[in-house]
Image (cartoon, helix red, strand yellow):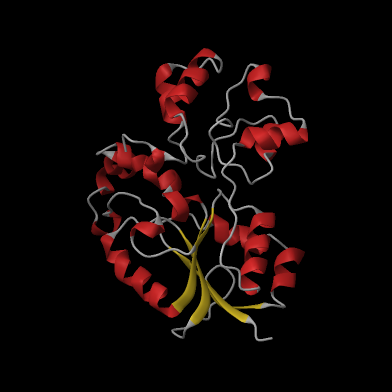
Amino acid sequence: MAKVKCAWFDFTSCEGCQIELTNFGEPFVELLEHVEPVEFREAMSEKTEEQIDVAFIEGSFSREADRRRLEQIRARASIVVAYGACAVSGGVNAMKNHTSDYAEEVYGEDAKRPHLASQKALPIAEAIKVDFIIPGCPIDKAEFVRVVEQLVHGTTKVYVPSYPVCVECKRRETLCRYDDNDHCLGPIARAGCDAPCPADGIPCEACRGMIDNPNEAAMEKVLVENGKLPERWAKDKTRMFTANHRGDA
């Protein structure tokens, strides 16, 4: 069977998900028996203009100038996968959508330089059709391998959980962060990562996005009353990775 030609592309992001792939080790090496990387900036210098089977896109859509490149990728690829929080939902980049002076805050006197000009940080799906998503910041190794295996075998649907991280904490018998006088976004955070952060004593920040129809108002109330966070912090907590999910974005 011919190998599946795959290419990885990056837009507004830290390229952490692409780097994470190079850290996978044996699982990724085993995938190379079935896939052929034809473009992968963090691991190879070769590029191609040919048709590809699967395009993995990392990073948010934050400049209108990038639309043409995204459209070209879409035209060349049989399947487009948005992977990582930035590509799937806008990720951390989307926090800037809540302020008008982010450029000055970040870049100071250099804020007006042309190459720093950008628009709202949006999911890749706002510019082109996306067939599948792999959420997370960074992506989860097991999930990425599972998705690629499914694509290689011609799947037409990739499963992404919509139940909360709390379910996975219960499975692991992890002490709830609230029972430890801490805070956590687990009740509205999308599962699928096996909840490693709470298991290590770290509150969930919802890096995989939110469940379908999350009750954000109730979550903020819990963060204040049970998590002992000031109201301003409680509101901002749900913006870390999920700013574009909020109605006030």
Residue sitting at x 41%, y 26%: 235
**Nearer-the-camera pick, 61 or 15:** 61
Residue 189, horizontal then vertical, whole percent:
55, 37
The percent coordinates of residue 139 (x first, y second) are 59, 53
Q: Residue at x 33, y 62 (%)?
A: 127
29 relative to 56 in the view: left or right: right
Left or right: residue 81 versus residue 104 is right
Picture quarter containing residue 20?
A: bottom right
Could you tell me residue 180's position as x and y percent?
68, 18
Please indicate, yes or no, whether residue 47 appears anywhere in the rendered image.
no
Most extreme residue toward the front is: 156
Identify the residue shown where x is 69% and y is 86%.
Answer: 1
Residue 184 appears in the figure: yes
Q: Nearer the viewer, residue 179 or 107?
A: 179
Along the line of sight, the residue nearer the viewer: 117 or 72:
72
Viewport quadrant of the C terminus? top left
Q: Position of residue 129 (x, y in %)?
A: 39, 65
Total marks drawn?
A: 0
Quarter residue 183 falls in? top right
Asked if residue 14 is positioned above or below residue 156 in the image, the reply reads: above
